[in-house]
Image: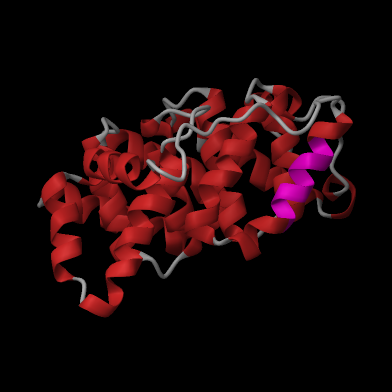
Amino acid sequence: MAPSEQAQKIHDELFPNHVSTLVVTDPELIETFDNFAFDEVLSHSNLDTRTRLMVQLASIIASQAVQEYRAMLRAALTVGVTPIEAKEILYQAVPYVGIAKVFDFIHVTNEVLTERGVELPLPSQSTTTAQNRMEKGLAIQKQIIGSDAVEKLYAAAPADEQHIQRYLSANCFGDHYTRMGIDIPTRELLTFSMLVSMGGCDPQVKGHVAANLNVGNSRARLIDVQTQLLPFIGYPRTLNGLRAVDDVTKS
C-alpha cells in the first residue's frame, strides 16, 4: 500500500527532504501509519497545523518518546511553532509529567534549537514574583477551574495535606499558567493532552475536560485533539479520554 497523495504531501511539509529509515526497514508499517495519521485522521481535524503539532508534542512528552519528540519538534518548528512555544510546552509539562520525565526533552529541545541557530536562553516569559505567585496563581486557578471548585478542594483537604493545595495554586498555576508565550485555552489543551497520554489520570482528565470547557474549548475541539493524538497514543488511552469527555459534557 503506497502513501496516499495527501499523506505524502503532509509528510513532505513536516519533514522536508527527509526519508525515514523505516521506509527501508519497515515499509508496510510506515505506509500504513502515514496514510492513517496524515490522511485519514487528519481529514477529521479542524485544528490549525500549529495547534495540532503543539498538542502532539505535549502528548509525546507525556508518552516518554524521546526519538519521536525530536522528529516532531523539528516538524513543529518547520511549520511555524516558535522556539518560545516549544519551550513553554516543556515548562507546562513539568507540574503534570514531572521534571524527572521532562529532563531529557529539555536537552533535546536545546540541541534542536541550537542546531537551528536559536540563541539560548530565550527571553523570560515569567509574569510572577516570589511575593505574588500565590495570589496570581490562585486567581488564575479559579478562572480555569472555577471558584467554587477550588474552594471545595481546599475545604476537602485534611490539615496535613493543605500544603499540597497551596502548591497547586502557587506552583502549578502561579509559576506555570501565568507565563506568557502560550494563551490559557492552548495551555489547557496541552494539559488535557498530557493527562490523557499518561494514562491512570482519569479524575484529573475529567477535571481538565471541565477546565477546557470553562476557558472556551468546546467538546468538538477536545474530540478533535483526541483524534489527532490517536495515532501516537493508541486506542485504549484515546477511548478513556473520550469517555471522560462524554461523562463531563453529558452531566
Whole-percent x, y for residue 65 in the image: 68, 57
Residue shown at 33%/68% (left/top)? 163
Left/right of residue 44 with respect to residue 213 in the rendered view: right
Q: Position of residue 67 (x, y in %)?
A: 77, 52
Q: In the rendered image of this protein, does residue 64 appear above or below residue 40?
A: below
Residue drawn 70% across the image and 39% down it: 72
Q: Is residue 209 above or below residue 44?
A: below
Left or right side of 7 for 234: left
Q: Is residue 154 visible to the viewer in this orientation of the structure?
A: yes
Whether the magenta-drawn stretch holds residue 105 is answered as: yes
Q: Position of residue 133 (x, y in %)?
A: 39, 44
| Predominant SS of the magenta segment | helix
Q: Residue at x 50, y 38 (%)?
A: 41
Q: Is residue 29 visible?
A: no
Would residue 207 be counted in the magenta stretch?
A: no
Tell me how many marks there are.
0
Start and end of the magenta stretch?
104-112
When asked about the image quadrant of residue 94, the answer is bottom right
Q: Viewer-proximal residue, 194 or 246?
A: 194
Expressed as whole percent of the image width and height from the top left, the position of residue 159 reads: 22, 76
The image quarter containing residue 16 is top right
User: Is residue 231 or residue 102 the one in the foreground?
Assistant: 102
- Looking at the image, which residue is at 55% across and 24% down? 49
138 vs 119, nearest the viewer = 138
Q: Which image quarter holds the N terminus?
A: top right
